[in-house]
Amino acid sequence: MTTTLNPGPTSSPAPSVPPLHGLRVLDLATLFAGPLAAMMLGDFGAEVIKVEHPRRPDPSRGHGPAKDGVGLWWKVLGRNKRTITLDLSSPGGRDVLLRLAADADVVVENFRPGTLERWGLGWEELSTVNPRLVLARVTGFGQYGPYAHRPGFGTLAEAMSGFAAITGEPDGPPTLPPFGLADSIAALATAYAVTTALTARAGTGRGQVVDLAIIEPMLAVIGPHTLWYDQLGYVQPRTGNRSRNNAPRNTYRTSDGSWVAVSTSAQSIAERVLRLVGRPELIDEPWFADGTGRAAHADVLDEAVGNWIARHTRDEALDAFEKAEAAIAPVYDVRDVLADPQFRALDTVTEVPDPELGPVRMQNVLFRLSETPGAIRWTGRPHGADTDEVLGELGLTPDEISALRSRGAV
């Protein structure tokens, strides 16, 4: 018997104890992989304390569109985080950070290698005050090697991983994504690395350093390109929306001006598509028997599928493909995403109250857990909003906090 799990919306505080409850994370990072990883940990119950410079807030607060002077990206990236200010390069800020680290489980940072060490906050100092600490170091090129001290951003990883080289039309330039793809993938990898290190700590009692170079997760997700080249000398060219592994696989324009995407990774699906579009004779061609053969005849297959779709509206094409049990999807923009019944059923985009903007809609937590779901407890908070409270919890008196503030340390 199969049971369908439907825990329902996860935007409200979960009734059960979330899986990362009790975990304390110090987020020292900026733009974007490190803070996004910390956000993911916070979504499932970790207490995340976002540390920003007193006079130079996280640049994501001003990145992209704003409403009434309030940066919108930060509302997502800063969700489920308490915000404090510390100048880590100052003696007072350093001392407070070490006191916080003594009771933390994870520190996430993305300064250039050597920066924390220069401030007296390297692994030696952090592990001395807390041997159980996990230090996640997220940089463009890693902690060592000839490029380690270069400034690194996701765009560079998208270029150097080989992603851009295989993206775009055959006669066009290498193409970069219009969003932070490499940073997002690196964030997922960082969250995975942190939970792996914490699992190891449960057995050893010791923390460790996570060294994550943003160039590497991108290389991992683009597929077996290195193995293809190593064994066959094959370098994948740009193929636009087509695949070298199967066909038909493309986007096609409908009669009402919409676009749909068709995939035929499975042989049975390819056969259903060709029967649906009225070209069953192509199935009998010797080259149709596998994905590579079909990809070599993509022009023929694209013409067959494209001509059929061009004679039908988007709804007609979607309905016919669904009845034929063939794989198709509409090409959405954000307006379509918000209106789609499947996304609504999953609560993929959820509404969250925000004290500055009122109700706001944003992407929900990444996955649903039937027993211990995650939740968006609050949106990104103002710069330094929780400084006094967090430092007070450390035992600092109001006078001590005021003295630190007068010296510019907080």
Image (cartoon, rainbow, N blue to C red):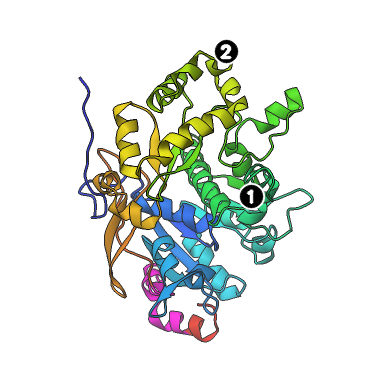
Residue at (47% x, 71% y) in the render: 61
The boundaries of the magenta stretch are: 382-402
350 up-or-down from 275: above or below: below
Q: Position of residue 209 (x, y in %)?
A: 59, 47
Mark 2 vs mark 1, foreground winner is 2
Residue at (38% x, 54% y) in the render: 42
285 up-or-down from 115: above or below: above
Residue type of the residue flagged with mark 1: Glu
Name the residue nearer the viewer: 42 or 93.
Answer: 42
Name the residue nearer the viewer: 312 or 79.
Answer: 312
Mark 2 sits on what residue?
286
Mark 1 sits on what residue?
158
> In this orientation, does residue 363 appear?
no
Task: Specify whether 115 is left or right of 178.
Answer: right
Spatial CA span between label 2 and label 1: 38 Å
Residue 3 lies in magenta, yes or no? no
**Dots 2, 1 in contact, CB < 8 A:** no
Mark 1: few/some/many CA within 10 Å (<14, 14-19, 20+):
many
Task: Specify whether 84 is left or right of 324.
Answer: right
Q: Position of residue 128 (x, y in %)?
A: 58, 54
Residue type of the residue flagged with mark 2: Pro
Name the residue nearer the viewer: 284 or 23.
Answer: 284
Task: Specify whether 323 is left or right of 203.
Answer: left
Number of numbered discs on residues = 2
Residue at (35% x, 44% y) in the render: 314
